[in-house]
Image (tube, grey):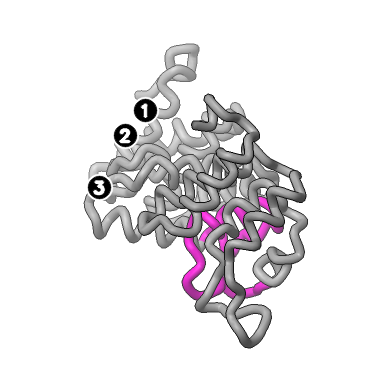
Amino acid sequence: MAELLPNSAELRAHLIESINESSRDDTSFEAQKIFAEQFEGDEQALIELQKCWVKPDGPAFIPELHPPFLYALALGWPHSPLLRPYLEQKKLPKGLPIITTLALCRINGNKDHALACIDTLIKITLEDGRALPDLYSQSLRNWARTPNAEILLRRLIDDRDSSRKITAISLLAAMGKLTDEDRTALVQQFNEVLGDTTKSCPDGVDLVNGTVTTLPQAIYRLLTPELNNGIRLR
């Protein structure tokens, strides 16, 4: 519909209905993503979106109850006053979806909240035994493009947790942000792990592609093009 009726009133109404009435999170998030892409910065569209949510009585900010369109606001209207309480929270608001939280982290650069999202996604992936929907990995990639994300990911490259480490390497590689020094250090780690038969290689989750792998396997897969261009493994 977005291709047939771009920026139209019909599309706007259809998306708002999907956002507010969908019982599936992925449908609502996809509708919000399209809404932001089609009507970003459009104040009239924002007014219509907000009118469809009946604000509950009580405090202006209720941690357990959130507007269903916060993800759209974060993508298309990052300066909306409705986002301010969420952007200023030191602790993650209860019940706030991970995808929405990552979008907010793109705005305020909160590294603690982003790390909490990464840890939760790792836990869910391990418990479910399958990759998360593409929308989650795409949200991670979008967040990883921000300067504060790169700071956190570079810190996680040296983390003891294998899932954090593998995911950080994978995200930096996907963003084209692995430096020659990074690649050389990773090749050294690869050689050290394989050269020490007493050293264990615990499995970890790569949230970018939803696989469970070991650190040597992840390094080899991510750096194979560079290795073929002159850096060699043992």
Residue toward you, 11 or 191: 11
- The kind of residue tagged 2 is Gln
Q: Which residue is mark 1?
A: 221
Please give the name of the residue rendered at 37% of the width and 28% of the height, measured from the top-left corner.
Answer: 220
Q: Residues within 10 Å of mark 3 (few under 14, many from 20)?
A: few
Q: Residues within 10 Å of mark 1 (few under 14, many from 20)?
A: few
Residue toward you, 175 or 162: 175
Mark 2–mark 3 CB contact (< 8 Å) = no
Residue 92, quarter of the rendered image: bottom right
Q: Which residue is mark 3?
A: 130
- Percent position (x, y) of residue 229? 49, 12
- The kind of residue tagged 1 is Arg
Mark 2–mark 1 CB contact (< 8 Å) = yes
Residue toward you, 99 or 76: 76
Q: In the drawing, does residue 69 fall left or right of residue 222?
A: right
Q: Residue furthest front?
A: 10
Residue range of the region highlighted in magenta in the rendering: 89-115
Image height of 27 relative to 56, above or below: above
- Percent position (x, y) of residue 125? 31, 53
Q: In the drawing, does residue 72 fall left or right of residue 97?
A: right
Q: Which residue is mark 2?
A: 217
